[in-house]
Image (tube, grey):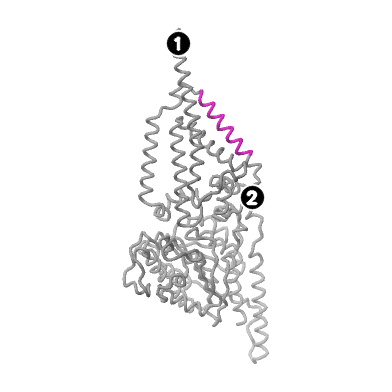
Amino acid sequence: MVKCAASRCVASNCALVGVLSMVLAWFGVLLLAMLAETQIKPGVGSVWSRAFPLLLAPLAIWSIAFFALLLILQRPLFTLALLAAAMLLLVLVNNVKWKSLREPFVHQDFEYFTDAILHPRLYVPFFGVWRTLIASLAGVLAVVLGLWLERSLTQQSSGYAWFGRAFLGLLISVLVLVWLSRRQTIVVTFEPEQDLQRLGFWGLLWLYTLQAFTSTATASIANPYQGRAQRSLSKACSRADGLQERRGSESQFPGPDPTDKPVLPTLVVVQSESFFDPRPVYPFINPDVLSAFDRLREQSWQTGALNVPAWGANTVRTESAFLTGLTPEHLGVHRFNPYHRFARETHIPGLVAELKAMGYRCVCIHPYPAGFYRRNEVYPKMGFDAFYDIQHFSPEQKCGQYTSDEAVADFAVKLLENTNEQMFVYIITMENHGPLHLESQPEGPLSRLYTDIPDTNASSDLSVYLNHLQNADRMLQTLQKALIQLPRPAVLGWFGDHVPIMEQVYEHYGYPSGQTEYLIWRTFSTDTPQQADLNVDELGVALLDALVCRIGE
């Protein structure tokens, strides 16, 4: 009897210890979640100024994570350690992103953890290779030690009594979060820096994720390009008819058959990686770095500064705005990676669909895997007829880390020379993509890049960037010469997707505005350039105007 009583007492004490460790670990997770927010850059607003749901929701979220993981691992302290590591990782990634891209971590960035595994060169160097290796080894070691050193709650209490308490904690946390989410009335601007101040880091992630799952913003908005093709063709035909009437009255010879459709030009658009004109910001750069761009700009139909919704990365935001004409305000929460939302659509109206309605064959050339940003899913729904990705290029065609602009230009020229179709060729280059600091300094004298040689330590990334920028300039010249030789008239559009990541350069010599440049050049007339600063979502309309305005010239 005494032994039985003693055994029951020991079991009761073990169960109590198990429950106590579970509760303490849970409180530890909640405390760490609050402390982690204080380390977020560029900083969050006061906790006490937030609405009650913004205080309760993060606690519910981390409680769900704790109890769900506890039910699997059965080890409270190990669960605490893993969640603390997850918080630390999110804080570090947020701060690295803020430094490089001037934007806090948002819900869409969780997808980049898998992208970092599939495309490590695009992400890991900015976090730090050694930091990544150490964090990975520390994570593996923590898992091994946690499973080995801490006894499971089942072993501590000789049963599953703890399971019911943990499940109850999980159920209550889920119900609280669901209740808060259904009653959510907090206004979200989707300007991450502003929202971070008001909502806090965990509140921002909660509300952005909630909006991403519930918002159908892109399904209900008007297509900015709607009917543009028909209006453009009607305008072209009327201009052609007027020209034929004038020529017929002035000549004894009959004009062209009025039933003929107007011949529209070949359209080539280059989205040049990280292209912008750095010379006004850094006057010590040799002006000849962009000599071809300068010449073509003087002969352009239209040119100017381009406002883009990205800094340093996130090409997909600029690309989406150009191809669909949709602004960040149209997209709402989907502005951070529009293609993630577009992949769920069956048809994506926009520039490509309008060009197809005008009779164009539409192709894209991009020397990178087609699945990145889910382009292979999105492009067919936009109307592209073909997508030439990295499989059409060889490793020998690289310049630096990626396929050279020269190789991409040669591929495009051959494509155009071997077809009689009315073509839209959309080129997305890769050569000048970072991380720039992984490349060695360019060969040859620096005088070809600078008029006044800057400090090497502060300008190493800039030298690499300018070397590739010069290659982009040569690509522009190659395309111009090739388009002049085509039997069909042509329009060439050129623009940058965002400024490059060069933190050291910016900190030492100053930050650019974030605008890039664009130009629209035509083979069939000598134009006095129209100067017009545009948003990138307006660029497609300008290109359609450039196509149609040739009729009657």
Near-viewer residue (126 or 512): 512
Q: Nearer the viewer, residue 280 or 486?
A: 280
Secondary structure, mark 2, is: loop
Residue lying at the far top of the rendered structure = 1
Instruction: Tell me the kind of residue under disc 1.
Output: Cys
Left or right side of 29 for 230: right
Q: Amino acid at mark 2?
A: Val
Res. 466 image quadrant: bottom left
Gap between marks 2 and 1 measured at Cα: 61 Å
Q: Is residue 169 magenta?
A: yes
> Is residue 343 rendered magenta in the image?
no
**Percent position (x, y) of residue 460?**
36, 64
Against 338, residue 472 (above or below) is below
First in residue order: circle 2 vs circle 1? 1
What's the magenta bit mostly, secondary-structure-wise? helix
The residue mark sitting in front, 2 or 1, is 2
Residue 11 placed where, x, y %? 46, 18
Q: Toward the viewer: 287 or 117?
A: 287
- Horizontal placement of 544 versus 87: left or right? right
Residue of label 2: 187
In terms of secondary structure, where does tag 1 sit? helix
Can you identify the residue that label 1 sits on? 4
- Magenta-drawn segment: 161-179
Q: Residue furthest bottom?
A: 252
